[in-house]
Each structure stands twice: as C-alpha cells, then as structure tokens.
Amino acid sequence: MVGVSLLVKVKMKKNKSEIITFKADEELAEALKDVPNRSEFIRIAVAEALGSGCPLCQGTGVLSSSQRTHWNQFIADHKLDRCDDCRELHLTCLRTVVTETT
C-alpha cells in the first residue's frame, strides 16, 4: 500500500480545510498521478459515492435487526424489477392503485 494525501475542504468554522489521508494500492496511486487536479477529482468522487449509498443501510451493506424488520414489512408489497431500458434494478410497488371515477 502507498500513502496518498488528500486535501479535502470541509465546511468548518472560519472556512478552514481539513487534510484527510488514505492508503491506496500502487495501481490506484499510479493512476491518480495522471489526474490534473487530484484533490478536486477525489473530492467529487467521494461526494458522489456518499450520495449514492443505500439509504437504508447507509452504504454498509448490512442491515441491523430493526432495519431487517422494516425491510421485510416493506418488501411484502414491493419487489425488485429490472428496467427494460437501462437494465438496472429498482423497486416496484405491488399494491393495486384504485382510482375513483365519477
């Protein structure tokens, strides 16, 4: 592993920045060397990754027993479907929507 330093601007009092360091394997460190603005690239990638995490497990990949109970209640009338256009999975409600006509 290679240590890679990253300056991440975090909103703090008086607009101070915080330095965050992480370990990267040699292949990733080598690939980052060719990125013109590594700090900005990594800030954007991390922000997007944090915003794309599962809202239920918050990116951990594991549900607590309470979360599992809620999930089981939810999935009882929902299912996973694959989109015909983009081929990604999404949730579909199984409840029949009843509309009144007058």
Image (spheres, rainbow, N blue to C red):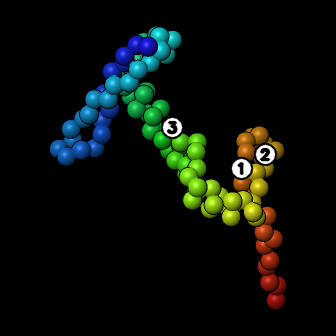
Task: Please give the name of the residue rendered at 78% of the width and 46% of the height, measured from the top-left corner.
Answer: 83
Quadrant placement of the N terminus: top left
Quadrant placement of the C terminus: bottom right
Q: Amino acid at mark 1?
A: His
Q: Secondary structure at mark 3?
A: helix
Spatial distance from mark 3 to mark 1, Cα to Cα?
Answer: 18 Å
Q: Earlier in the sequence, mark 3 or mark 1?
A: 3
Residue at the spot of label 2: 82
Local crowd size for mark 3, using a 10 Å CA cut-off: few (<14), some (14–19), many (≥20) = few
Spatial distance from mark 2 to mark 3, Cα to Cα?
Answer: 22 Å
Q: Earlier in the sequence, mark 1 or mark 2?
A: 2
Q: Earlier in the sequence, mark 2 or mark 3?
A: 3
Spatial distance from mark 1 to mark 2, Cα to Cα?
Answer: 6 Å
Above or below, 52 against 56 in this view is above
Residue 2, can we see it? yes
What's the mark number on residue 24? Answer: none
The x and y percentages for residue 96 are: 81, 71
The x and y percentages for residue 27 are: 51, 11
Residue at the spot of label 3: 49
Residue at the spot of label 1: 90
Q: Secondary structure at mark 1?
A: strand
| Discs 2, 3 touching: Cβ within 8 Å | no
Q: Amino acid at mark 2?
A: Arg
| Discs 1, 2 touching: Cβ within 8 Å | yes
Image-quadrant location for residue 12: top left
Local crowd size for mark 1, using a 10 Å CA cut-off: few (<14), some (14–19), many (≥20) = few
| Discs 3, 1 touching: Cβ within 8 Å | no
Task: Please give the name of the residue rendered at 49% of the width and 38% of the height, measured from the top-left corner.
Answer: 48
